[in-house]
Image (cartoon, rainbow, N blue to C red):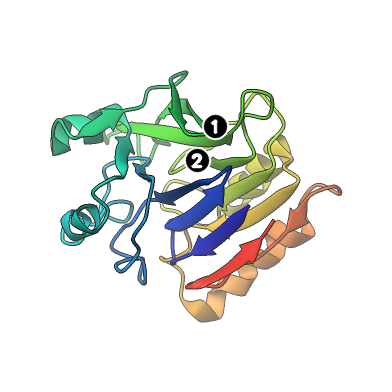
């Protein structure tokens, strides 16, 4: 598995012969010239996960890519988008994509809760080789290989990020969703996640516009 990070929640995952780009939002950069995608997957409708000013150009550059998203985003963006509900399974070649979760984490009780699909990539025998939770703390019911763990968010305390990492207990955790943090402060969040992770979990930071092999 190869993972490239384009800042905040945008990652490109190459696994089982497929290339999937997640959450190309307005805090992310460097994904604009990517071609040859098998799918573009959007966890939810917020602009830091799907940039309305750049998504159409990305789609035009990848005419063969399937467009996968949570149900509300699919409804908002039109019939070319496929709604992936919790429990749905999408197959792209040898890759199995399983939907999970369903709802965005609560930002405030007075604000409406929107859809959020957790995307799990793998095979029928190992369905969660990679997990992108979007803006949620949903725990997959199976062993997770690589978890893209949210590091900071308006809907989450740092203690909740640590508890989520411990609950999932993946083989590897890579931090995402830190575009809202000043670069000088990012080490505070990464440090706590690294120090307080489960003993058998590797913590791996992929810098924006860099990549790593797992």
Q: Quadrant of residue 60?
A: bottom left
| Left or right side of 12 for 1 | right
Q: Which percent across, then down, holds residue 104?
A: 39, 35
Q: Which mark is residue 152?
A: none
Q: Is residue 174 above or below residue 210?
A: above
For the residue carrying disc 1, how many other residues have a C-alpha within 10 Å: few (<14), some (14-19), or many (20+)? Answer: some
Q: Is residue 23 above or below residue 30?
A: above
For the residue carrying disc 2, how many other residues have a C-alpha within 10 Å: few (<14), some (14-19), or many (20+)? Answer: many
Instruction: State yes or no: discs 1 and 2 in contact (Cβ < 8 Å).
Output: yes
Q: Which residue, given by chain and number where applicable, does mark 2 sit on? A: 133
Q: Give 162 or 141, whichever is nearer the viewer.
A: 141
- Badge 2 element: loop
Q: Which percent across, then down, holds residue 214?
A: 69, 56
Q: Earlier in the sequence, mark 1 or mark 2?
A: 2
Q: How many marks?
A: 2
Q: Which residue, given by chain and number where applicable, does mark 1 sit on? A: 138
x 29%, y 67%: residue: 32
Q: Which percent across, then down, holds residue 201?
A: 79, 49
């Amino acid at each position: 598995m190869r993972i490239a990070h384009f800042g905040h929640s945008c990652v490109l995952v190459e696994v089982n012969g497929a290339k999937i780009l997640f959450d190309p939002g307005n805090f992310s950069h460097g994904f604009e010239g990517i071609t040859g995608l098998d799918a573009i997957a959007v966890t939810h409708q917020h602009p830091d996960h799907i940039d309305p000013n750049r998504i159409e150009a990305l789609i035009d550059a990848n005419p063969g890519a399937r467009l996968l998203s949570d149900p509300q985003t699919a409804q908002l963006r039109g019939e070319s988008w496929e709604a992936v509900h919790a429990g749905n399974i999408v197959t792209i070649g040898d890759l199995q994509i399983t939907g999970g979760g369903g709802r965005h984490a609560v930002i405030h009780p007075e604000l409406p809760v929107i859809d959020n699909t957790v995307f799990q990539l793998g095979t029928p025998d190992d369905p969660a080789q990679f997990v992108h939770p979007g803006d949620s703390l949903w725990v997959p019911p199976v062993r997770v290989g690589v978890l893209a763990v949210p590091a900071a968010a308006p809907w989450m305390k740092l203690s909740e990020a640590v508890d989520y990492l411990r609950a999932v207990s993946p083989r590897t955790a890579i931090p995402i969703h830190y575009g809202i943090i000043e670069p000088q402060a990012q080490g505070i969040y990464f440090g706590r996640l690294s120090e307080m992770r489960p003993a058998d979990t590797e913590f791996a930071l992929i810098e924006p516009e860099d990549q790593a092999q797992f």
